[in-house]
């Protein structure tokens, strides 16, 4: 199994001047699910090099087992510090692509032409595409057979109520849930902050940080089938 993970390079939260980036658990949990399943993982980001970690995701209250493991794992830290530039990656040679969230993708990946073309290449080739939390927004400008890729598909992602809870409804450029619905997607969610994943064909989505590891497990299951 060859898996590509794609991270944001955007590090400022709207016009607040506060830092943002990718959510650390949403990288570490899937990364170790993939590694432990024997997969070969390549990590890319929009600008390459070390992508920005949302400092909030690394606060004491947000620590998880996979994050603890990552902090003791020099090899994984090197992988993250040396991500490949997204424009240099194609779908060839990979079985699937996985997008961790955090708020960063709302500003760069959602409109990144390399990302859009990459997702279309994977999906058109019948290869699974997975995105969690805010990252289902990377699908917003992706089309399949001339229609939005999410149209008529069951999809989850960071809920409006979760965005409200972190008080960023007015800061983000759009709400993930609203966009899925606007594009004709069949948005679903579980209770706020609970694990909720959706598999519809070869599109896999997870609702929030806690859903990132479980979504990765669903992806592995799909690849092994």
Image (tube, helix red, strand yellow):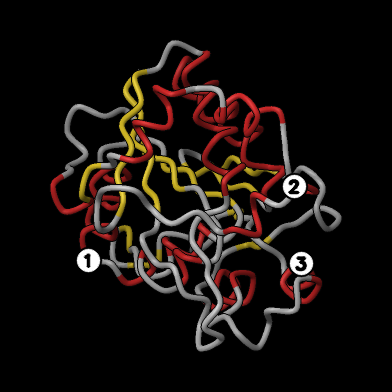
Residue displayed at 75% across by 56% down = 189
Count of labels shown? Answer: 3
Query: On screen, 143 above or below 30?
Result: below
- Give the residue pinned by disc 2: 62
Spatial CA span between label 1 and label 2: 32 Å
- Residue 8: mark in rendering: none
Give the structural element (helix, strand or loop) at label 3.
helix
Q: CA distance from mark 1 to mark 3?
A: 28 Å
Mark 1 against mark 2, which lies toward the viewer?
Answer: 2
Across and down, in percent, residue 28 comes to 55, 35
Q: Position of residue 107 (x, y in %)?
A: 42, 74
- The local crowd at label 2, few if under 14, some if 14 to 19, many if 20 or more residues have their Cα within 10 Å, is few
Under tag 2, what secondary structure?
Answer: helix
Instruction: Name the residue tied to disc 1.
Output: 113
Residue drawn where x is 65% and y is 59% of the image: 56
Q: Which mark is residue 162?
A: 3
Give x and y (percent) for residue 88.
13, 47
Residue at 59% x, 29% y: name it: 218
């Amino acid at each position: 199994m060859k898996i590509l993970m794609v991270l944001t390079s955007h590090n400022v939260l709207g016009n607040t001047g506060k830092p943002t980036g990718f959510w650390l658990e949403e990288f570490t949990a899937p990364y170790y699910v993939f590694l432990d399943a024997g997969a070969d993982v390549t990590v890319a980001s929009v600008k390459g090099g070390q992508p920005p970690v949302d400092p909030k995701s690394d606060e004491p209250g947000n620590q998880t087992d996979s994050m603890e493991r990552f902090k003791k794992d020099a090899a994984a830290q090197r992988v993250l510090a040396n991500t490949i530039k997204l424009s240099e990656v194609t779908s060839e040679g990979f079985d699937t692509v996985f997008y961790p969230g955090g708020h960063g993708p709302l500003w760069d990946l959602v409109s990144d032409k390399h990302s859009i073309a990459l997702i279309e290449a994977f999906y058109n080739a019948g290869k699974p595409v997975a995105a969690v939390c805010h990252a289902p927004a990377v699908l917003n400008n992706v089309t399949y057979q001339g229609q939005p890729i999410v149209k008529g598909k069951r999809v989850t992602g960071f809920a409006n109520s979760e965005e409200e809870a972190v008080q960023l409804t007015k800061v983000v450029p759009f709400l993930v849930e609203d966009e899925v619905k606007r594009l004709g997607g069949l948005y679903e969610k579980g209770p706020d902050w609970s694990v909720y994943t959706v598999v519809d064909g070869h599109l896999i989505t997870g609702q929030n940080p806690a859903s990132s590891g479980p979504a990765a497990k669903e992806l592995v299951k799909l690849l092994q089938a």
